[in-house]
Amino acid sequence: MLNKNFAIRSVNNIINYDDTVNDGTEQNFEFNQRLGLIIKKKNLALIPYAKITHHDKNVSTQNDNSHLGFIFQAKFHKDLFFEYDHREETSNGSKIVATGYIYGDKVTDVRLIKKNLFFLGAFPIHLKIGQVDGSNFRRSRVIKTTLDINKKTDLAIKYVDNSGKGFFKNNVAQNRNYLVAEFGYKF
């Protein structure tokens, strides 16, 4: 934190990425890194950021990419937040090489976050409801509950409902719904 109105935020995550174009025969990792500047004024925050996605093994069908974006956050109450996140691709990484078709070059993410929805003993449970819309790619609706184990670790359950769009409208991979368990560590 630089002072009470300015801070720098770095968010990184790594996921096991199943390359379904190879029928799941190749497993690798996807690295997502985001660096932003938080500008606060009372109950409002603006966070301009840069984001990159990189795969440790790249086949011709996987595309690394980078985005520039911003998050607008409004705090309605002590534990209730609204976020609007918009980013645009800068790398042309979301282009399908064979067809030249561009997807996901503009992404909009809207979230409503309720911290401390209730407590399980001494452990707070948080709720996040959101929708992500990737142009010509897919729309995802998300419901996520998170249990804080302590200040550094948490467990989460996330339900995702995907709807493919554009070129991917009938693509099974972009239309599947799933339930995910996550373990988080903050440092």
Image (spheres, rainbow, N blue to C red):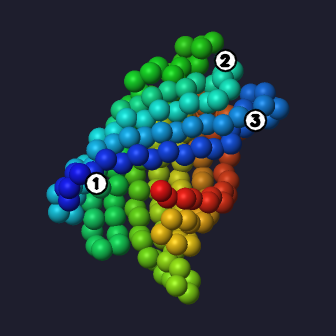
First-in-chain label (1 vs 2):
1
Query: Could you say whether the residue bearing mark 3 is in a helix, strand or loop?
Result: strand
- Residue 92 lies, in percent from the top left, at 47, 20
Q: What residue does disc 1 label?
A: 1
Tell me if mark 2 has few (under 14), some (14-19) or many (20+) residues whose alpha carbon lies within 10 angstroms of its own.
few
Q: How far apart are the two marked residues, 1 and 2, measured between alpha carbons? A: 40 Å
Q: What residue does disc 3 label?
A: 27
Query: Could you say whether the residue bearing mark 1 is in a helix, strand or loop?
Result: loop
Q: Which residue occupies 46% across, 77% down?
A: 117
Q: Which residue occupies 30% across, 74% down?
A: 78
The answer, for residue 74, to whether it is visible in the render is: yes
Residue type at mark 1 is: Met
Which callout, 1 or 2, points to the residue nearer the camera?
A: 1
Q: What residue does disc 2 label?
A: 60
Rendered view: 83 above or below 53 = below
Query: Could you say whether the residue bearing mark 2 is in a helix, strand or loop?
Result: loop
56 vs 131, nearest the viewer: 56
